[in-house]
Amino acid sequence: MRLAELSRRGAVSTATVKYYLREGLLPPGRRISATQAEYGEEHLRRLRLVRALIQVGRMPVAAARDVLAAVDDQSLDQHMRLGAATWALPHGPQPAEDDPAVEEARRTVADLLERLGWLCGTGPGEELSPAHHGLVSSVAALTRLGYSCDAARLLPYARLAGELAVHDLDRVEEYDRPAEQVEAAVAVTVLYEPVLLSLRRLAHVQESRRRFAP
Amino acid sequence: MRLAELSRRGAVSTATVKYYLREGLLPPGRRISATQAEYGEEHLRRLRLVRALIQVGRMPVAAARDVLAAVDDQSLDQHMRLGAATWALPHGPQPAEDDPAVEEARRTVADLLERLGWLCGTGPGEELSPAHHGLVSSVAALTRLGYSCDAARLLPYARLAGELAVHDLDRVEEYDRPAEQVEAAVAVTVLYEPVLLSLRRLAHVQESRRRFAP
């Protein structure tokens, strides 16, 4: 397809498509004349992923480029490639050093992961993952604000998160090719976050009605 | 306690406490002299909640004030008061009008709520809740980006959200007084969102290892 059709099917302006091409977020098309290029379904898929990252995930262009570089890194096996791609997604703030609440949160998270038998805190070279840092930060925030939060309390949330992950990766495995699976994993991670938070708030209303309505 | 102790125990500067008092985010203390006031445990609890809203939830002062007004509204029954307080929390963007993806998402969400038997889409006066709008927007974003998303696909996520809500409201019911319960509901809603998203990303790594690791 030509750029105009790619723009129409991806529901973004041609100016935006050209901007993404210039920024390296979309690979160049196949040149068919001095002024025209041909684009394929893989460009359309990539365009949608870029929109998911930038428009829904509100990621800066540089961060989106890092995620896509990991998506395209064929030197990794599939597990590592999925990990690298979601590793590059934005996460919450890094936990502060020398903060007693952070030290306590680190112990809580270590205790939790051990109870779950999850080996997921670390990535290549045993470096702690951004998701691990994010969890430590948010548990520390709870503690600091006087809402104590130990591993026993986190356990049911982690078990439910594990069930969510099964559904998420079922969606990913609906795609056949490894490259499409990695793209889908990134898109599902980012796009289902607001879905999940809205569903939880709706469920609060339902559960509050059940318990407290007169 | 005096302002200095409130500031120390709430882990914010005295300047910040004075700012929150001026902005009406904290109720005034009991005046004990021309220059001094006395604060109670309820001030400390409120100070922590304000920090949760502003520092973790990144809410503007005006939005935090709206949430607190709902928390303090004693004219409502407990279910309505919980609803009003979380209703005032910030949500995602409103769904666009005249967008076919939004129309489709509205039907999907209506279908989902019917299958679940949830009556939670509406609040006082049958107005659609912000959580309902947020869900429609995020389902529309999925559709627009080529990830189709029908009620059958959302159902397992909604069921898991329902289980999360049970745990969340168990935490809320650890508090005895209705006013404390409403404060806890707001804090738990805001503070557990980053916890949950980090846990989900950790669970992805674990599930990906199980499926894809060589």
Image: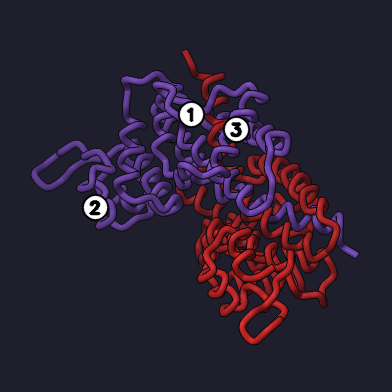
Chain colours: A red, B purple
Q: Chain of mark 2?
A: B
Q: Which residue is label 3 attached to?
A: B107
Q: Amino acid at mark 1?
A: Tyr
Closest to the observer: A114 or A135? A135
Q: How many marks?
A: 3
Camera-nearest label, 1 or 2: 2
Q: Amino acid at mark 3?
A: Arg
Discs 3 and 2 lie in a common subunit = yes
Q: Residue at x 63, y 58 (%)?
A: A9
Closest to the observer: A174 or A152? A174
Q: SS class of the residue under badge 2?
A: helix
- Residue A21 percent across, percent down from the top left: 60, 76
Q: Which mark is residue A59?
A: none
Q: Which residue is label 2 attached to?
A: B19
| Contact between labelled residues 3 and 1, with CB atoms less than 8 Å apart | no
Bin the neighbour count of mark 3 within 10 Å (Cα to Cα): few under 14, some 14-19, many 20 and up. Answer: some
Give how far apart the Cα atoms at labels 1 and 2 are.
28 Å
Q: Return the residue found at the far bottom.
A: A34
Q: Amino acid at mark 2?
A: Tyr
| Contact between labelled residues 2 and 1, with CB atoms less than 8 Å apart | no
Give how far apart the Cα atoms at labels 3 and 2 are.
46 Å
Q: Residue at x 56, y 43 (%)?
A: B100
Q: Which residue is label 1 attached to?
A: B175
Q: Can residue A165 be spotted in the picture? A: yes
Give how far apart the Cα atoms at labels 1 and 3 are.
38 Å
Q: Can residue B9 be spotted in the picture? A: no
- Residue B17 percent across, percent down from the top left: 27, 51
Q: Give whichever of discs 1 and 2 has the lower sequence position.
A: 2
Q: Chain of mark 3?
A: B
- Residue A153 percent across, percent down from the top left: 64, 40
Q: Residue at x 77, y 68 (%)?
A: A81
